[in-house]
Amino acid sequence: MKIVARQALLPEGWAEHVEITLDGGHITGIAPAAPGAVADHDTLLPGVANLHSHAFQRGFAGLTEARGPGADSFWTWRDMMYRFALGLDPDAAQAVAEMAYVEMLEAGYTRVGEFHYLHHAPDGRPYADPAEMSARIFAASAATGIALTHLPVFYAHGGFGPTAASDGQRRFLHDREAFLRLIELCDRMAADRPGAVVGLAPHSLRAASADDLAALIPALPGRPVHIHIAEQTPEVRDCLAFCGQRPVEWLLEHAPVGPGWCLIHATHLTEAEVAGIARSGAVVGLCPVTESNLGDGIFPGPAFAAAGGRYGVGTDSNVRISLAGELRTLEYSQRLAGQARNVMALREGSTGQQLFDAALAGGHQALDAGVPGLAPGAPADLVALCDPLQMGSDGPTMLDRWIFGPDITVGDVWARGDHVVRDGRHRDRAAVTRRFARVARAILG
Ligand code: ZN
């Protein structure tokens, strides 16, 4: 199949009037289009990797926004999340994940990093197949077409110390041996799914102890490692009280943090921690929409970018799935904090382009998805932006208009060559929405 675009973002920069050939799920050719060829699409981008999702949390998006009797916080939100998590059986979890993945594809994401911790039956016992819930994530990925980096979560404790896990956490828990078995089962599923990657995710320094990290990381070499860290100030305070170090400070000193690592949130950092993460080559996984929703705080973005730090974006709680929205919220939160404009841009020129480039590279690195970009041999993961005003904007201006303005939308998406989104709608949106609505009503109605 051939696609002609008015312009396309290639690894070497923007090219005009381009013909891209797709075959067998990959890009097989990129060449100037014939002079008289009519463009099928306006602006083509490579698909971006969504580096952090908890798919099931899509199920209660928008339902935790009413004020309770006391002060609301991340921790009251977490109570609601636990209640919802306890109500999902495997069929329901798959239906919710399919809804989230349809919306991700419609937003321009072609791969998801699923930070997966809903492992066991509602009573806390493993299913007959201990990888049952992971299998449903693989199934949702296959059904919708989004590529998967599966990140099974190791979760063993309720807090620093370690302290015992609470009853609400019973579906999340493993000992190390059972966790290694889960990874083995996931590897088997990944072997049958083109492009699938299996990493590991020690949930946080609250849920995985120093001994757990020291045992698991060397036992599973060469895989992406993701961890929630320094999202909330109480977590920083508790870590300091426990070991005398801040979470990121401790991690950089005690774990082999490097380019294969993704530090999710890393919101509360000292200057030394900013420099340390940047030096390590690890990616920071920013989730600006969720971080705003939960009131986490503001990541020191300009300092981190100036230090050469790498970052990508994730949809995390999936409260509102929007790639443009993540990039816009990232930039806007920094503008509010710094009382300045265009603050995440390191050099003159389009802020949208610089945000997009960073998220593209950081997302692929964090999810072990290979070299990003539209190039022969790469998976055919393409996103077409459409411009109803047909202004003929150059590439960087299209990205600025998409991220910050109201007119530009994602029109079409190809996932491994499969044309899954047309005119902004996933081909299975109607059926997926019906199944999702049944589940949401059953649990919450
Ligand atoms: Zn998360």
Image (tube, rainbow, N blue to C red):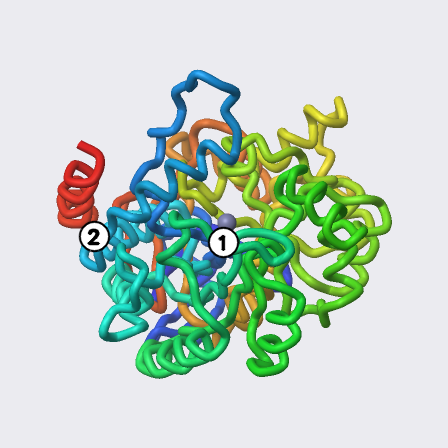
Using the numbered discs, state the Cα–Cα distance from disc 1 to disc 2 in whole angstroms. 21 Å
Question: Looking at the rendering, which quadrant does residue 222 occupy?
Answer: bottom right
Q: Is residue 185 left or right of 374 when viewed as pictured? A: left
Q: Looking at the picture, which amino acid does disc 1 mark? A: His
Which residue is at 81% across, 57% downward? 276
Which quarter of the figure is the N terminus placed in?
A: bottom left
Q: How many marks?
A: 2
Q: Give x and y (percent) for residue 96.
A: 26, 49
Do the numbered discs 1 and 2 sit on residues whose CB atoms are within 8 Å?
no
Q: Is residue 217 left or right of 321 when viewed as pictured? A: right
Identify residue for label 1: 52
Marks 1 and 2, the one that precedes in the sequence: 1
Q: Does 70 sit above or below residue 74?
A: above
Q: Is residue 364 left or right of 241 when viewed as pictured? A: left
Which residue is at 42% across, 76% downward? 178
Return the mark for residue 177: none
Q: Is mark 1 within 8 Å of ligand 1?
A: yes
Which residue is at 38% across, 70% downward? 21
Q: Looking at the picture, which amino acid does disc 2 mark? A: Ala
Q: Give x and y (percent) for residue 336.
A: 68, 24
Q: Secondary structure at mark 2?
A: helix
Mark 2 crowd level (few <14, some 14–19, many ≥20, 10 Å Cα): many
Q: Give x and y (percent) for residue 141.
A: 31, 63
Q: Nearer the viewer, residue 385 or 315?
A: 315
Q: Give x and y (percent) for residue 189.
A: 32, 78
Q: Does 106 sit above or below residue 117?
A: above
Mark 1 crowd level (few <14, some 14–19, many ≥20, 10 Å Cα): many
Which quarter of the figure is the C terminus placed in?
A: top left
Identify residue for label 2: 92
